């Protein structure tokens, strides 16, 4: 199961359109780093739990 975080669904000040997909731990790590580097957030439990709550199972249109 892969998960995705779509920045378009998060409130952002820079109209970010990034989507991060992968294993849950990878997505969480990448999303935290992205939020810090691109959105000016600070690393915190609150940030991590906020991102984790935005994780969604990947929907694959090509799934048979
Ligand atoms: Zn973003």
Image: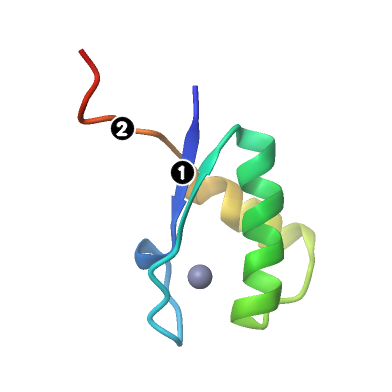
Residue with the most extreme bottom position: 13
Indicate which disc, 1 or 2, sits on the residue closer to the N terminus. 1
| Picture layout, residue 16 above or below residue 60 | below
Horizontal side of 12 relative to 32 (left or right) equals: left
Helix, strand, or loop for circle 2? loop
Q: Are marks 1 and 2 in contact (CB under 8 Å)?
A: yes
- Residue under label 2, please give it: 59
Horizontal side of 50 relative to 19 (left or right) equals: right
Which residue is found at the position 28% from the left and 30% from the top?
A: 60
Whole-angstrom CA distance, mark 1 to mark 2, is: 9 Å
Check residue 4 in the rendering and tell me which mark sits there, or answer none. Answer: 1
Residue 23, position as x, y percentages in the image: 60, 32
Helix, strand, or loop for circle 1? strand
Q: Quadrant of residue 31?
A: bottom right
Check residue 31 in the rendering and tell me which mark sits there, or answer none. Answer: none
Quarter of the figure with the C terminus: top left
Which residue is found at the position 70% from the left and 73% from the top?
A: 36
Mark 1: few/some/many CA within 10 Å (<14, 14-19, 20+): many
Residue 41, position as x, y percentages in the image: 68, 77
Horizontal side of 63 relative to 13 (left or right) equals: left
| Picture layout, residue 26 above or below residue 7 | above
Mark 2: few/some/many CA within 10 Å (<14, 14-19, 20+): few
Residue nearest the viewer, comparing 22 with 44: 22
Residue 18, position as x, y percentages in the image: 44, 64
Residue nearest the viewer, comparing 23 with 47: 23
Residue 53, position as x, y percentages in the image: 53, 47
Residue nearest the viewer, comparing 27 with 55: 27
Residue with the most extreme front position: 62
| Picture layout, residue 59 above or below residue 15 | above
| Picture layout, residue 55 above or below residue 50 | above
């Amino acid at each position: 199961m892969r998960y995705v975080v779509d920045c378009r669904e998060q409130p952002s000040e820079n109209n970010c359109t990034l989507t991060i997909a992968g294993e849950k731990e990878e997505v969480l790590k990448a999303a935290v780093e992205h939020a810090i580097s691109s959105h000016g957030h600070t690393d915190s439990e609150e940030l991590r739990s906020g991102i984790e709550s935005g994780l969604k199972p990947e929907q694959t249109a090509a799934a048979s």
